[in-house]
Image: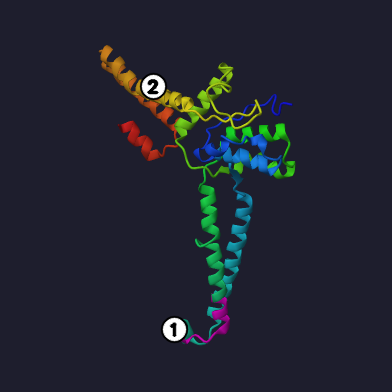
Amino acid sequence: METIASCMPLCGDLESGAVEEAQTRKIEDYRPGYPRYTALLAAHTPYILCRRFSKLRARLLLLKQDRLSVLEERLEEIDQAERSPLFLGKSRCDKNLERISLLSKIESQLADYGTNQFASSTYQMLSLNPAEQRDVESLQNWLDGNGCLAKEESAYLAHCGELVSLAPTRDSAILQLENWVETRLIRLWRNFRKSRFHNMSNDPNVYIHSGQLIQRIAKALLLLLITILLLMPVVVCSIINTTSVRIAIVMVSTISYLLVLSSLTKSRTMELILAGAT
């Protein structure tokens, strides 16, 4: 029985850490359920996705902020009602037990609200790279075909907008080209998934690429594209003698180069400015 007959195949690079185990066990060798699903995730680390829970984090952040605001207002009231100016100017002599207790509570609340715990963890979670739509669709296809995980517990994949990847960051330009090359090879080369490549699954609809063919083709295409964008204007300008046309060619080629650069990479504004100036 085919597992994902009408869905897109799973695609990706086999991680080096799973190569040794992949040579002895297939994904289907694990029992249905979390054992089999986690074996799939371990085979390709970009499949290890999780939710940011941005809405819940924002809610808790607002609550913690409001609690501190209330404590801050209470501290100001205590200071305004203080009858001994010495207590306000010399903390060592402060005998106001209510203020001392309140400051202790504020300190604990700030430790939870500030960089020690909640704020830093929220910052780290929001800094993670968004999950690739390709990886999310692959996991959804696999789950729809196997049905070995409860729908309620696999529903996290439906929150595409807040899914993040825990895998190490890769060059976005190379990654996009690899995905493009892989898709074309799968569609145009019928035996691409059967010959010359190791597959971790017995399911003919599940494919995890482990070779270097895709990486080499993607790098070659990237180098070819960069060479064309950089050298083609030089060749054209050497043929044309009109100054105004040369200026127009330089402008068009620079704009084209920056557009391609911004679409393939996550370039910052200053990096684009430096690239255009160069």
Q: Pick the quarter of the image with the C terminus.
A: top left
Query: What's the residue type where badge 2 is placed?
Result: Leu
Q: Residues within 10 Å of mark 2 (few under 14, many from 20)?
A: few
Q: Which residue is mark 1?
A: 90
Q: Give whichever of 5, 27 is nearer the camera.
A: 27
Q: Which residue is mark 2?
A: 224
Q: Give whichever of 159, 143 is nearer the camera.
A: 143
Question: x, y (%) of residue 122?
Answer: 55, 54
Question: x, y (%) of residue 139?
Answer: 64, 35
Tell me what residue is drawn at x 55 percent, y 70 percent: 108
Q: Is the Cβ of the residue at disc 1 closer than 8 Å to that at disc 2?
A: no
Q: Is residue 81 left or right of residue 88?
A: right
Tell me what residue is drawn at x 51 percent, y 62 percent: 116
Question: Do we see residue 168 in this rendering?
Answer: yes
* Main secondary structure type of the part rendered in magenta: helix
Q: Give whichever of 209, 157 is nearer the camera.
A: 209
**Which residue extends farthest front?**
24
Q: Pick the quarter of the image with the N terminus.
A: top right
Relative vertical location of residue 78 with respect to residue 44 in this rendering, above or below: below
Relative vertical location of residue 54 with respect to residue 37 in this rendering, above or below: below
Disc 1 to disc 2, how far (Cα)?
72 Å
Query: What's the residue type where badge 1 is placed?
Result: Lys
Total labels drawn: 2
Question: Do we see residue 240 in this rendering?
Answer: no
Question: x, y (%) of residue 6?
Answer: 69, 24
Q: Where are the magenta residues, as a range?
A: 92-103
Q: Residues within 10 Å of mark 1 (few under 14, many from 20)?
A: few
Tell me what residue is drawn at x 52 percent, y 42 percent: 167
Q: Earlier in the sequence, mark 1 or mark 2?
A: 1
Indicate whether residue 96 is drawn in magenta.
Answer: yes
Give the quadrant of residue 163.
top right
Label 1 sits on a secondary structure element that is loop
